Image (cartoon, grey):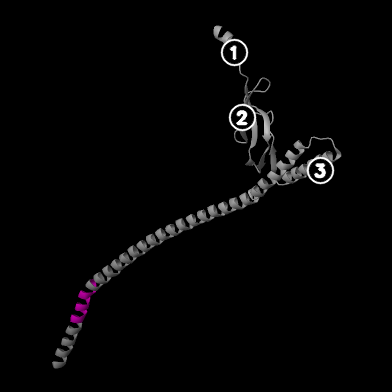
Amino acid sequence: MSHQQSSHEQQTDAELIAEVLEQTKPAAAETGGEEPAAEETVSIESLRQQLEQAQQQAAANLDKALRTQAEMENLKKRVQKDLDDERKYGLAKFAKELLSVLDSLELGIQAASGDSPEVVKLREGSLLTIKQFESVFAKFNIETIDPLGQPFNPEFHQAMVMQPSETAEPNSVLNVFQKGYILNGRLLRPAMVVVAKAADKPADSAKIDEQA
């Protein structure tokens, strides 16, 4: 009798344990199912924020890189332009000094008007030197401005005086006091010129015009 009672008690205890376990399973399953889902949601949101921050930083870095590249390109162009200008116009000061020597030679030729052998030799030597100057100038792209008979151009000509003329077109170069020069398209020295203007009408002619 006691044996049966003990067996019944053991069975009852086993059943109770099984029943408790059955009751706790849904709660455990419910609790265990919610927590990982919440953690997963937090993790995805955090990754999304990190991705957005990384994209913003990448865009900022790209913008800085493009700006730096543009600045470097502009600097490169400025340096190249300065080098080109130095190569083209570095001779400007030296060429201006040579122009004064050339002017002296031309004035010497104008003054050497005699026919003596010494004067003739001097004139021929000066002309030969001027041709050598012109050859050197052509090699370094120095061009002469000799605008006799051409329309007056204030960019390359300097008007010394206006002179009435019945033969020359008004506003044309009537005479050249001093030639001008250009270095690679840039003005070294303007040509000093006399500019023609319409001849003044006689007083009688003016009266006739008024009467008419």
Mark 3 sits on what residue?
A: 125
Mark 2 sits on what residue?
A: 161
Q: Amino acid at mark 2?
A: Val
What residue do we see at 67% from left, 49% from top? 94
**Residue 203 disc label:** 1
Using the numbered discs, state the Cα–Cα distance from disc 2 to disc 3 in whole angstroms: 33 Å
For this orientation, the residue located farthest to the top is: 212
Q: Amino acid at mark 3?
A: Gly
What residue do we see at 41% from left, 60% from top? 57
Q: Position of 184 compared to 69: left or right?
A: right
- Mark 1 secondary-structure assignment: helix
Q: Was residue 25 drawn as part of the magenta stretch in this picture?
A: yes
Q: Is residue 94 visible?
A: yes
Q: Position of residue 42 (x, y in %)?
A: 31, 65
**Residue range of the region highlighted in magenta in the rendering:** 15-26
What residue do we see at 76% from left, 44% from top? 135
Q: Position of residue 79 (x, y in %)?
A: 57, 54
Up/down of 27 relative to 93, above or below = below
Q: Position of 47 compared to 168: left or right?
A: left
Q: Earlier in the sequence, mark 2 or mark 3?
A: 3
